[in-house]
Structures are given as structure tokens and as C-alpha cells.
Amino acid sequence: MSGYLNLVGYRPLDGFDISEPAALELPDALLAAIRGAVAGRGEQASDMEDRIADVRHKVPDQHRSEFDELLGEARATYRLRDERGIYSDIWASGLMRRAVLAGGRRLAGRGRIYDAEHLVDAGLGEMCSLLSGSEGPSADEFASRFEDRASHTAKEAPAHLGPPPPPPSDPSELPPTVARLMRATSIALGEVFGSSEAQHDEHLLRGLAASRGVYEGPARRVSGPAEFGRIVQGDVLVTEATSEAFNILLPLLGAIVTDNGGLLSHSAIVAREYGIPGVVGTRDATERIADGTRVRVDGDAGEVAVLA
């Protein structure tokens, strides 16, 4: 257990910023993950090979060997995405948070700040100055910064700073190999971050059909790991977007609905892997679906009906 906690305990559960709590700071979520692993939940049958065979059958005979090669390459390298995020970015952020909180506890003990976590909202120069005994912002200033950050969400941030960015260059003006790479990159980014533009009806939300199947159950709006304890078996997860932190909930979920993300987003991928009906990229499901409302998630049509 000590080895496991040393490995994962200081990673932020949901994000790449030192303001996010680490696993050891949310023991209920961590305990749920451990219990899930011990119980073997999530070992669900997958029809992935059947789906691959179905797609491969549609590929013309003369291109199947190329299809097999590209698929093998994709399956071999895709895991690098999560490995880079977890073992590089997230872990580094967690170690930095651990150091900042250690410094914060010292300063709180001296009466320089009210709470150890308030040091998270200091700049590096301010941290060094305070810990060395020099002057710095007051405890009231840090408390105000903390309250300001905690009272806002990423959805309130503007889409860009300054004037709107120019459109990307026309790939046809680039050398052929570079143009092919730029087109592929644009398609991939769109499928990761893009959302549906379909219009909603009063009691029907439209998004992207991310994972097949139809499921009806209570909606549970969750903004992050601090609320994971509210999820019970059979709930429909309604959230802005998911990250690796949400993986521990997957064995409990009946369906997934998100505001953001395309067919290659984390939400869509894990829904397909676990065989959970999923609709992603609805834009505003978290605003239109009240917590506890009964919904029907149609992962085939990409629709979410609000029933009651």
C-alpha cells in the first residue's frame, strides 16, 4: 500500500495545475479506486475486435495491408498520450504542489497566511520571499486571491485574448507531405476538442454519438473529483469533460454525457472501451440537465432526452 501511495498519491486527480488536489487529499476517491481494483470491476466484455473487423471489411482489398499496418502503429503509440500526461505533466505538477503545501504549512504556522493552500496563489518570487522571511503580500491578499480563483470556472474564460486569431494557412500552399500532416493534425484536433453544432429542442439535447447503446437513468452532475462520492451504481455522468481521474467511476456508470469534446476525446474513448452509451460535445448539458433528473441517453443517435 505504501508503494502504491508513493506512486499515485501526489498526482493531481484532475488537471495539470498545482491548484488541483492530489489523490491523498481526496481519500474517498482514492479508496473507491482501490476497492474497484480489488473487486475487479470494469472487467467488462468488449466487442472492440468485432468492430475492428467490421471496419476492416469495408476497406478495399488492395488497401487492407496498409490498414493493418496503420492500425498496428496507432495501437502501439496511442498509449504514449496518457503515459506522457500522467508520468510527466501530472506527476510533476503533483510534486510541485506537495512542495508548495509544505511551504504553506510553515507560513501558516508563522501566521503569515491563513491556510497552507493559499500559497498556491503566490508567484514563485513571492513564495521564495515569504519563506526566506522577507516581505510579501499579506494574508488577506492571499485569502482574496484564493477566493477569487475558487469562485470562477474555466467556462467563464474568454475563447482567446486579444483580437481573434487568423484562420490556419491553406494546406494546398504547403509542400505535399507537410500539407498531408497539417490536414491530419487539423482533423485530429477537431475530433478531440470539437463539439456538436446541432440545435437542441426543449427537452432534447443533441451532441456527438460517441458510444453505442441506449440507457435511461438519473443524471448526476459532477464537476470534479471532489464530487465523486455522489455517484452511485447506474447513474448517468453529466460533466463538462472527463480526464483520467474519472476512470475510477466507469464501472459505476450507466452512461456518459459531456459538454465538451469530440469523438477522440477522453470521454468518448473510455465510453467505447467500457461499452457505456455516450453522447459528447452537447455544449451545455450541465446547464440544461438538473441534478437527479431522469434522462435517456441514445449513444446511437447522439441525443439526450430529459424525461422528468
Image (tube, rainbow, N blue to C red):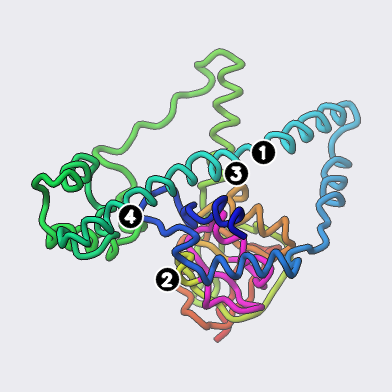
Residue linked to disc 3: 82
* Along the line of sight, the residue nearer the viewer: 281 or 112: 112
Residue 276: x and y, percent? Answer: 70, 65
Q: How far apart are marks 2 and 3 (CA)?
A: 29 Å
Checking the image for residue 78, the label placed there is: 1
Which callout, 4 or 3, points at the residue further toward the start of the chain? 3
Tag nearer the camera, 2 or 3: 3
Residue 84: in magenta span: no
Residue 243: x and y, percent? Answer: 54, 55
Residue linked to disc 2: 287
Q: Distance between the residues labelled 1 and 2?
A: 33 Å
Q: Callout 2, which amino acid?
A: Glu
Q: How crowded is mark 4: few (under 14 residues within 10 Å), some or many (20 or more)?
A: some
Q: How crowded is mark 3: few (under 14 residues within 10 Å), some or many (20 or more)?
A: few
Q: How crowded is mark 1: few (under 14 residues within 10 Å), some or many (20 or more)?
A: few
Residue 157: x and y, percent? Answer: 31, 53
Tag nearer the camera, 1 or 2: 1
Q: Distance between the residues labelled 1 and 4?
A: 34 Å
Q: Is residue 275 above or below residue 78?
A: below
Which segment is the magenta one? 228-256
Q: Which residue lies furthest to the bottom in this view?
A: 308
> Which corner quadrant holds the N terminus?
bottom right
Residue linked to disc 4: 101
